[in-house]
Amino acid sequence: MAAIRGIGIAAIVIVVILASAIGAFILVDSGNDNDSGTFTVLDDRGQNVTIPKYPQRIVSLGTSFTEILFAIGADGQVVGVDKTSMYPAGALSKTNVGSFYTLNAENVTALEPDCIITWSFATSTISTLEGLGFPVIAYNPTSLSDTMRVIKSMGNATGKSAEANALVDQMQLRIDAVTENVSGISLGDRVKAYFELRSGKTTGPGSLADELITMAGGVNIYGNNASKYPQPSLEFIIESDPDVVIVENQSSKTNDDIGVWIGSGVSAVDNDRIYRIDGALVTACPRVVDALEQFAEWFYPDLFGP
Amino acid sequence: MESADIGALHTKKLSLWFLIIVILVLLLFATVVFALCIGPVGIPVDEIINILFGGEASWSHRTIILNIRLPRVLLGGLVGASLAIAGAGMQGLFRNPMASPYVLGLSSGAAFGASLSIVLGFSIVSGLFAVPAMAFIFSFITLLLVYNIAKVNGRVPVDTLLLAGIAIAAFFTALVSFMKYLAGEQLSSIVFWMMGGLWDARWEFFVFALPMVAVGVAMILIFSRDRSVLMIGEEHAVNLRINVPLARNPVLGASSLVTAAAVSVSGVIAFVGLIVPHMMRLFVGPDNRILLPASCLVGAIFMIWTDTLARTIIAPEELPVGIITAILGAPFFLFLLKRRKGVTGW
């Protein structure tokens, strides 16, 4: 009796799911056919970009934007991505249009996009695409708050506001958990960190890595530098005596290379606190919160440890 | 009898030259047609013909052919023609086989202008021409600097001019390196710009460059007679009471004009200006009257083919065409060097 009831419930659930899926499909489909309305989105250039409500043929030129589109469930509206869009795996099955720095516009044109999303610093690519008549939304997220703002804006642009807001709320909760946990640490007790990019350069103020280090309760030893991506000075690193060194996983240097280069006597080397992080996490994407939590755990294993 | 022979020989030479030019013009036309048919997006030839003659075709394919490929192919031809004739002009001018359109450091100045616009967003105009305008202005600032530094008592000794060019180029290259250091996300843009490429080719750029290239090429061709005098060397030219700076100004200025026009819309494309004139010297001889127009046409053909390779070889990605011209150009240059060992003239 109980078994039959279980099967019955399962059958009803399946039917409801199928029906709503079909319904959703028909709704989306009819929306596509009948709703020829347009609306405007304010992008990071301060430009009001007119796009269809909602775009169904998006070309995403930037790994951050592709990742966001997938995270908010707009991946079905994406027809093309640039070559840096490697995550999530679904992005690899989208048409690759090449690099947005040296874009051949015919690859994009062939996809007949109704909306293109890219970085605002790709100025010549933007003017080429706009010259061909395509609406281009250009963002320039360089911080966590920027990232969340862009996620919301992209949700608004693609008709996925609910999903985007839910994602941002969830990110904010995790960020708050980290910052509240480290808020009690006095300035003198804060962990000093040195971060190295795959290029061998480090990260100064205004960079995402600098913000992550600070939010995770650390002090970036290059946090007061004049330029954003300075070439590190060995003397300065030794003098600053970082407690933790974080290297991008894509760097050709091994942890041992770094240890030998900096030399013993520096806390991070002596205490074996040289860590590696996937550089793809230290970008303006939803997974940046993973990097934040990872940093916090490396800085304060007692507070964040398992 | 003897003079009649010379006359007949001369007529024969002229008709040969005429034939060469006609063949090259036909080759150029064929090249443009072929290049238009090849690209990362496959479009059937009959559809391309339809598009060109106003027939039925999809909107995206029409846009690709008329607003992306056609301006790109034509701009490529313009850039190749400019660099090649400027190279031939400079080589004749300086009596130096090493001379290229960039010998006076124009490309370094242009790169600095471009990087100012790319990194700092500083330009005299905004929008489409932000980078080309700065590149163009700074290549002319470079020319004026080099020329005036080299000028001694109204004369411009060739070695001083070349050395001044090297020094100014080094200075601007250092400034470009500083710009690269300051650049964050824009770093790749500068690097790719300096490799040279036509991915941003647009009708606007073609319209911008065409009048300058037309005037420049015409000037180089017209003043080639004066240049034959200069081929015997500045000292001799002075002895012949030819006003050297005046005789030199139009060609130097015209070569610089076409080079600046080319660089501003395509970046620093290597080796075309060096290799094409040498190649043509091998085929048509050193006489400027045939060498200059032949270099101009072959430069255009060479550039369109290498750019076709650049946009298809790793499609959908692009290879900066400067990489291809250098990879093809350098070994060929060495081949010419080996050949000409022991042979006089260049």
Image (cartoon, rainbow, N blue to C red):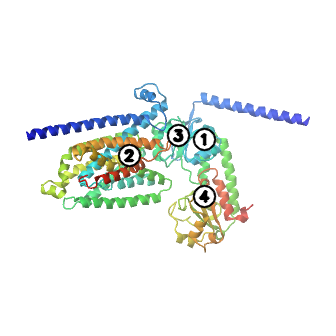
Task: Give the labeled residue for mark 2.
Answer: B265
Q: Say which quadrant the C terminus of chain A sits in.
A: bottom right
> In the rendering, at what x and y percent does residue B223 appear?
20, 46
Mark 3 or 1, closer to the camera: 1
Work out whether A26 lies above or below B17: above
The residue labelled by disc 3 is A49
Going by the numbered disc 2, the residue's amino acid type is: Val
Q: Is residue B257 visible?
A: no
Horizontal placement of A126 versus B329: left or right? right
Q: For residue B172, which quarter of the picture? A: bottom left
* C-alpha distance separating marks 2 and 1: 35 Å
Of circles 2 and 4, the one toward us is 4
| Residue B56, image x, y percentages | 46, 25
User: What residue would you read off at disc 4?
Assistant: A249
Mark 3 and mark 4: Cα distance apart in space: 37 Å
Task: Please tell me whether mark 2 sits on a helix, a strand or a loop.
Answer: helix
**Subunit bearing disc 4:** A
Secondary structure state at the residue bearing disc 1:
helix
Query: Which numbered circle lies on residue A93?
Result: 1
Q: Is residue B224 above or below residue A205?
A: above
Alpha-carbon span between mark 1 and mark 4: 25 Å
**How crowded is the residue under tag 1: few (<14 C-alpha within 10 Å), some, or many (20+)?**
few
Please tell me whether mark 3 sits on a helix, a strand or a loop.
Answer: strand
User: Dividing the picture into quarters, in which one does residue B120 lie?
Assistant: bottom left
Mark 2 vs mark 1: tell me if same chain.
no
Q: Which residue is more in the foreground, B121 or B236?
A: B236
